[in-house]
Every structure is written in structure tokens, then in C-alpha cells.
Image (cartoon, grey):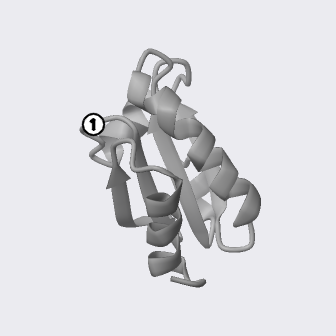
Amino acid sequence: MHPPFSQDLRAAVLFASSTCPNCANFKPAFLAVARTHSQLATFYALDIDKDPSGETLANHYHVQGLPTVIFLSQGVAVGRLVGDAGEANFQQRLHALFGGPQ
């Protein structure tokens, strides 16, 4: 199994579900940070219910709650953010792991 993000230098992968209210609340924050921080990482949003490999990837990265963002460095998980953390917390975690202003 080689997901597209496994070869990225740095990636942030959102594991979410279309039936999850907290996922629906957090997704706009994820997308906003992705638009303004594309120089720090590649961003992926994965719906585990709709993507054929979604559940397999969620198990591989030990996702236990939704939404979860897994931060990857060359395919290796280096951090995670679980729940509807909001835009500011997501951005702060991204900067702490991949650089940028704190």
C-alpha cells in the first residue's frame, strides 16, 4: 500500500467522514490552512467512508477518532491532531512540526 502522500517530504492528512458532525465543522479550517500554508506541506483530505482505501489507511495510521490529522514526514507519522481543534490550533501544530511562525 503506497498512498499518494507516502512520498511527500511533509504532508498533513485529514481523516474524516461525511457522516461526522465534528468533521464537517473542522474541514473548513483544514482547507483554509491548506490554502495559506502550501509551502510547508502537502495537504490531503480523506473521507474514510467514500475513499476505497480510507478504512485501510485509517487502520494503518491508528486513527481512532474523527476527525484526525496525521502529520507525515517522508511517509512517517510525526504528529497528530484529534478532534475539531479549530484553525488556530491546527495552524500552531503545523508550525511546531514543520516550521513557520509560532
Observer-nearest of 60 and 41: 41
Which residue is drawn at the image coordinates 74% and 62% (left, top)? Answer: 36
**Image spot of residue 57 (x, y percent):** 42, 39
Which residue is drawn at the image coordinates 42% and 22% (left, top)? Answer: 21
Observer-nearest of 64 and 74: 64
Residue 4 seen from this side: no
**Image spot of residue 79 (x, y percent):** 36, 66
**Image spot of residue 99 (x, y percent):** 56, 84
User: Which residue is tagged 1?
Assistant: 65
Q: Is residue 91 left or right of residue 20?
A: right
Q: How many marks?
A: 1
Which residue is drawn at the image coordinates 35% and 34% (left, top)? Answer: 66
Observer-nearest of 78 and 26: 26
Residue that lies at the very extreme toward the top in this rendered image: 19
Which residue is drawn at the image coordinates 42% and 55% (left, top)? Answer: 70
Q: Is residue 36 left or right of residue 68?
A: right
Q: Secondary structure at mark 1?
A: loop
**Image spot of residue 82 (x, y percent):** 32, 48
Q: Is residue 17 above or below residue 79?
A: above
